[in-house]
Image (cartoon, grey):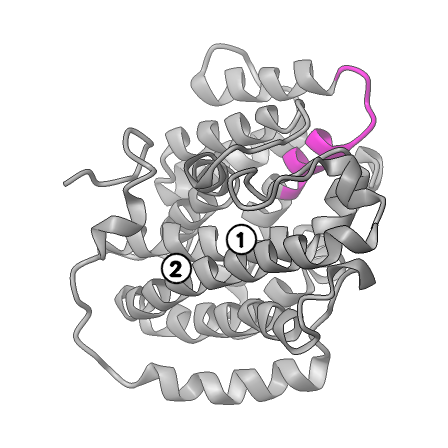
Amino acid sequence: MDNLQLDNLSPKKLLARHGKSFYWASLFLGPKLASSAAQLYKFCRYVDDLADGDIPDRQALLENIRACLKGDNQPVDAEIIAFLKLATDNNIPLAAAEELLDGMLSDQTPAAFENETELLRYCYAVAGTVGIMMCRVLKCKEDRAESFAIDLGIAMQLTNIARDVLEDAHMGRRYLPASWVNLSASDIAEIDTTSYKPVALAIKRMLDLAEEYYESALLGIQLLPFRSRFSITVALRVYRQIGVLLRNRHFCWWHGRVYVATPKKALLSLRSIMDLRPIKVPAHHEPLHRHLKGLSGVISP
């Protein structure tokens, strides 16, 4: 999407058009929180579109946004000004936004991860950071909720990668670690029958890993304010369903993307009511963050 089109859409309309699963979940937040969540989504979408677009100087633009977040440059872009106001109003740590930009900048070099550590640190940068920022937008007062929010972001990004293997390969990107599958992006993009099984097995492994983070996130949702709890549970359930659909079609990645239909979203929303029953939230499972040491918002043992 070009930036002019993005500028012409309100945050809510942008979310409805390009983040359908998140828009569905936002309907349960209430107008004020939904508006703030949509504004955060618009900022994230803006930098993501820059990173994935064909603008010749996109790396310089991303570096300028990062400098604006650090206070080294004066922002003139309406999207950055709007985000900085959102951050001030909601006490969003700008270190998380800076690491989001680091993730987008890393995508300027075609991804070819070697191992699970590189994969998870990338997922933290482009999605775990969003979990941290969303915690603040949702007015969560529980500091330890952020560890679980990171897990939800990571789980969703792992799901994205599993869903978009073929699309990413056509862009020269291979997010599946080489330690899982010894194929290049071009090998995957060719859809040779010899690549069917090894890529499918790597996708299964990706979704199995995502499940560990979804399970953790589901526990941590209990730390959110009650009104937000249901909405985020719906978002989790709907996004997790993408992985279920991939499993149901036996990881046939060469068939392209899968989508969660609206009737299924409604059913998952009803089922999410059961997740509202109060439980005692255990301590965060530290091994989930063993690859993330040194990153902002990550509590080291």
Q: Which mark is residue 158?
A: 1
Q: Nearer the viewer, residue 96 or 173?
A: 173
Is 51 included in the stretch rendered in magenta? yes
Most common SS among magenta residues:
helix
Which residue position holds label 2? 213
Q: Amino acid at mark 1?
A: Leu
Q: Nearer the viewer, residue 12 or 180?
A: 180
In reply to whether residue 46 is colored magenta, the answer given is yes
Q: Residue at x 59, y 88 (%)?
A: 267
Q: Quadrant of residue 292?
A: top left
Q: Amino acid at mark 2?
A: Tyr
Give the structural element (helix, strand or loop) at label 2.
helix
User: How many other residues sit within 10 Å of disc 1, few (<14), some (14-19) or many (≥20)?
Assistant: many
Q: Position of residue 182 (x, y in %)?
A: 62, 39
Q: Residue at x 38, y 45 (%)?
A: 90
Name the side, left or right, on which 27 lies relative to 49.
Answer: left
Q: Which residues are magenta?
A: 45-57
**Foreground pick, 80 / 132:** 132
